[in-house]
Structure formats: structure tokens, C-alpha cells
Amino acid sequence: MKICLTINSSPWSAFKGGGQLAVHHLACSLFLKGHQVHVLYSKKPHEQFNIKVPYEIHWVHHYDFATINLNIFSFSNVLGPLAEKEKFDVIHGNAEEAYWTGKIAKRNKSTYVFTSHTPNIPITGMLKGMMRPIRLLKSLNTYFLRQAIIEADQVVAFSHFSHDLIIKGINNTCANKIKVISPGVESSWFEVERKPSSGSVLLFWGRIEEEKGLRELFYALKTVSKVVKDVSLTIVGEGNRLREYKSLVAELSLTDRVEFMGWLCSTKIQNLTARSSLGIFPSRVESFGLSVVEAMAAGLPVIAASGGAVPENIEQGVTGTLVPVNDADALARAIIFILENVKDAESMAEKAKMVVQQKFSWDKAANKMIDLYELHSGM
């Protein structure tokens, strides 16, 4: 089978996690199963990369523009001629860059599959959205994404939460074309050998954005520090709230307890999980929560907010600890309890690791995706 995957809007230089890594691992797994795989990634004009991957890469011009994602044009400009040349059996989109993909797939008689990574889908089309022009401009890209979903032959959701969001945004008429297929976890996470340091080290990795709940985490840390004197927090990631949160940490007199490390590769994050006491993920909403599952795979005890899809993967008090969303006090109490009951926390982490090993792998995810491709491409 000949398959083309398109990635989301971040350029290759920002290739650090989330949807990009999901596409990469899926592409590798599909290749290992004997399929011809092409992937479209974007880069800025001055960037040059020498990348070794088993699949074929096609480069797309990346535009940085705040309001509208101009990459919907650059991706279609590359995908159109490529699809006509290669005659793909399946074209698989992953973000609003797939806005024109439905038309391209139809013209070339390819099956068009779309994976939804976002927790935000408008409940009306763009025409109705124009009745609120300011709001429309602020969320224009989500309307492109909505149309990309509507035109797909089959839609993949990473979780049941994401499945329900799609139905809410598009309506029940698309329910029969949505399939829940969880992503895998890269195998190196299961190989982490934990040797926690003597201190109480908390670890977070992900985007530094409002929806990740870091504000509540900092206030919780202030409370915890009054009880657990050696507690510290390591933050891995970048995002639009980085400067604001560094200022908040200073205002709370936590500068000596919080370390912002920027983006790190998976290997370095795994090294941090080996030395940390607890993974903290207070996100307000997650369409899947890959960082949470990675932490569980590494055997790191986890506390997470019960936002979005996270409760689908954590059994409260058995494989991890769940706290309410937007509740710094509850988060603080949970952290203190876990740090004071280390053996119980490590026991939950061992169970979590076994569950994740059984449930998530890219080999299983790729097999389910191939079944989906074959069903709708008539192969």
C-alpha cells in the first residue's frame, strides 16, 4: 500500500513531541510492515536538514503567521502534484494543513483519513462563524480543521473523549466514520531504570500554555514547600506562557525551587524521569495526554488533573492519582500525600507500567490503522 502522511504546522526544527512524533512513529511502523510511506514536513526557507528516516520526506515551505495558518496553501501546493504522481492509496492528514486534502484525494481516487489531535472544534461552519468576525479571526484555523474533518472518508480519534468532541463539533452524521485508535508509546520509555534522587523532585514535560494547568501547579508547589522542605520542580518545554510563568514563579518566591529547562529530547526527559520522584500533569484538557502515558511507561508515579481523556488511561488509586481540574489545593494535597507515601506510589507506578505495556504500542496502532486503510480503500 502506498501511504502519504501530512504533519501539523510546526516546522521540523520544532520537532519535539505530540502530533509530530505520533506521525513519525506511525510512519516508521507502517514502513516496517512493508508499506511505501511518504511524509510531508514543513521547514523555513533557510533551514537545511540531513535526516535519516526509513520513509520518504517531502519538504513544505513553513509560514509563521499569527492569525491564519498559511501552511494550508504550502502543503496543498506540494501534496497536489505529489499525489498525482504517486497515486497514493491513502492520504492521511493530521491538522488544518489538510484543509484541501479532501479535494486532492478525491481527484486522485485516494482514501482520505484524518486524525484529530485538537480538543477545540467549532460547532458551526465558517459562514455562521462570520456573524462574530472578531471571534472568527482568533480561531480561524479551527474552522479550517473542522472542514478537513468533514471531508474525510474516515476520522481517527486518539481517545473516546476526542471522539465525543468531534461528534459535538460536527454532529451525529459523522459518527459512523469515527474510529478510536490510541497512539503508541515509543519502546525506550519502558526501558527507563528509575533511581530517584534523595530529594523530592517533581517533573513536568509538555507545552508551556495556559491549558496545561501550570499556574495551578506553581500555587500548589508554594503550599507543598511549607510541608516538604526539599521539594523542587523541573519544567521541560516551551510555549507562549514561558515568560509569564517565570515571573509568577519569582512572585511566589519559588525561583530556587523551579528549573525551566526548555525543550529536551526524549532521551534526556527519560533520564530526568529516572531521577524524579513524581510526574505532575495538571492539564485542564487533553485529547489524549501522551506525556502522562510516557511517564507511566517509565514507571514514574503520576498525578494528573482529570481533564479530557486523561481518566481513560489512569485508574484512580490503582495506576495513578487524579485531581480535579483548576484546583491548586487538591493538587497540593495529592503531592504531599504521595511524597509521604512513597512505597504506595511506587506500587501504583509498577501497575501503571504493566497496563501501558499491554495497552499501547506503535505496532498495535499501526495494525489497526492498516485495517482501517484497507477497509476504506477496498484493498
Image (cartoon, helix red, strand yellow):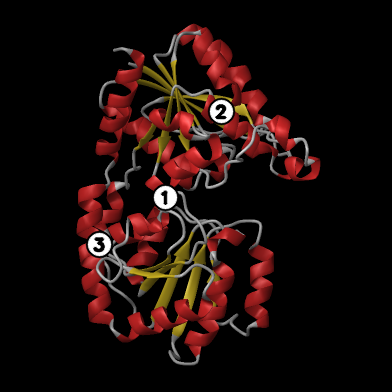
Q: Is mark 1 on a helix, strand or loop?
A: loop
Disc nearer the start of the sequence (1/3) = 1
Label 1: which residue?
288
- Mark 1 residue type: Phe
Q: Is mark 3 on a helix, strand or loop?
A: helix
Label 3: which residue?
352
Question: Which quadrant would residue 337 be assigned to in this image?
Answer: bottom left
Can residue 45 be seen here? The reply is: no
Q: Label 3 neighbourhood size at 10 Å, few (<14), some (14-19), many (20+)?
A: many
Whole-percent x, y for residue 79 in the image? 55, 18
> CA–CA distance between discs 3 and 2?
35 Å
| Above or below: residue 369 compared with residue 355 | above
Check if mark 3's residue and mark 2's residue have beta carbons within 8 Å: no
| Above or below: residue 90 compared with residue 107 | below
Label 2: which residue?
148
Q: What element carries label 2?
A: helix
